[in-house]
Amino acid sequence: MPRSTRYCSIEKPVITHRFFCLVLFSLSTALFVLSSSALADTGKTDSALQAVTLRIDNDIFAGSDRGYSNGINIGFLSQTVDDFDDSRLPASYRWLNHGLGWLQPREWDQYNMALTVGHGIFTPGDWRASELVKDDRPYAGVLLVGVDYNGRSDNRMQSTGLDLGIIGPSALGEDLQKGVHKLLGSETFRGWDNQLRDELVFRLSTQRLYRLHIEPGGGGDWQQDLILRTGGSFGNLVTDLNIGAEWRFGPQLPDNFGSAPLLPASENTVPTRHRDYSRRLKLHGFIATNLRGVIYDVTLDGNTWKDSHSVTREPLVLDLGIGVAGSYGHWRFAFAHYFRSREFEQQEEPPRLGSFSAWREF
């Protein structure tokens, strides 16, 4: 049964709302100051930012507008170094790393790090209802800033990360969705007064990945590999365990640990010292799966410390993604269509969504 069936309409005390906005602004500002400092070093030393990444998730790619309705993630990736105190890293990155030594992977051959800003919007299926829809997921907006550390040795990799942020009105999910829908001339969701309330959230995560090369057979330029992953996360944002795999196939595969956007450690943030900036378009396909054992999800279970709307979460959630990825010069991109099993018992239809990612390497 849902953790709480009692629901109070959202109130926004001025002091509390301003406090959350101040925290939100401080986290975002700190991230952009660090990344801007790294960008300012470009051309001066070899310690410049290695890549800027963008990922957009939206269920409209799959012909719907419900559930995990929209997500956007912007990332700033460092170059590959020997350790996280390497003098080739910008001073701002090394300053951050001194306080997060406990989070960083150890005893690997190559390392890099990524700073990210992410935003997600979650809505029920009935956009017309202004009253609480008790048998559908809560309205929620989530805004996060994060740091991820990656270590690699040959065909093995470890990724660890920390995300901090806000869920609730201060995450501006309502404002962003209404602005986009107005710009596109589409209907706006009317139930945002029932969204989850302001709460600081965090997530610690870790992933282990292994890349297995598969002999194609029959000769030719065709290549295949299989990336295996396992890991989990802990926090009042999400607590879960996961196991998954990705099969890739094509004439030439990139030297990383996965092409599918959205899945854990899938932003291709793998450390590497060799880049291929060919002016020839290279494409390959992939099929990715990921099984999660979900222990807690604030977007389904509701607010941690306050009474709020919630639904009966499914303990196991399976993702299947099918897509294509490619590269051209300094650009890389990927698109996947995802099929997901039901995330909560009352969900009428299994969700589907599309995810697109683009990279610009330096």
Image (cartoon, rainbow, N blue to C red):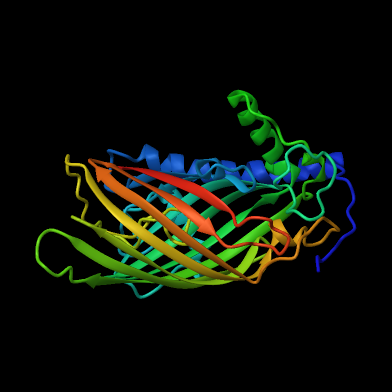
> Residue placed at 37% from the left, 52% from the top?
323
> Residue placed at 40% from the left, 55% from the top?
322
> Residue placed at 73% from the left, 47% from the top?
139
Left or right position of 212 against 144: left
Q: Measured along the vertical axis of the image, is residue 178 above or below residue 26?
A: above
> Residue placed at 21% from the left, 55% from the top?
274
For this rendering, which residue is in front, 53 or 64? 64
Quarter of the image with the C terminus in it = top left
Q: Position of residue 351 (x, y in %)?
A: 59, 54
Image-quadrant location for residue 247? bottom left
Quarter of the image with the N terminus in it = bottom right
User: Given the current orientation, which residue lies at the most extreme left position?
Assistant: 219
For this rendering, which residue is in front, 172 or 77? 172
Image-quadrant location for residue 313? bottom right
Left or right position of 268 against 145: left
Q: Position of residue 338 (x, y in %)?
A: 48, 54
For this rendering, which residue is in front, 55 or 15? 55
Q: Is residue 5 visible?
A: yes
Give the total of numbered labels.
0
Q: Position of residue 146 (x, y in %)?
A: 54, 54
Q: Is residue 172 visible?
A: no
User: Given the current orientation, which residue lies at the most extreme bottom position?
Assistant: 107
User: Given the current orientation, which residue lies at the most extreme front position?
Assistant: 348
Q: Position of residue 8 (x, y in %)?
A: 90, 50
Q: Measured along the vertical axis of the image, is residue 83 above or below residue 106?
A: above
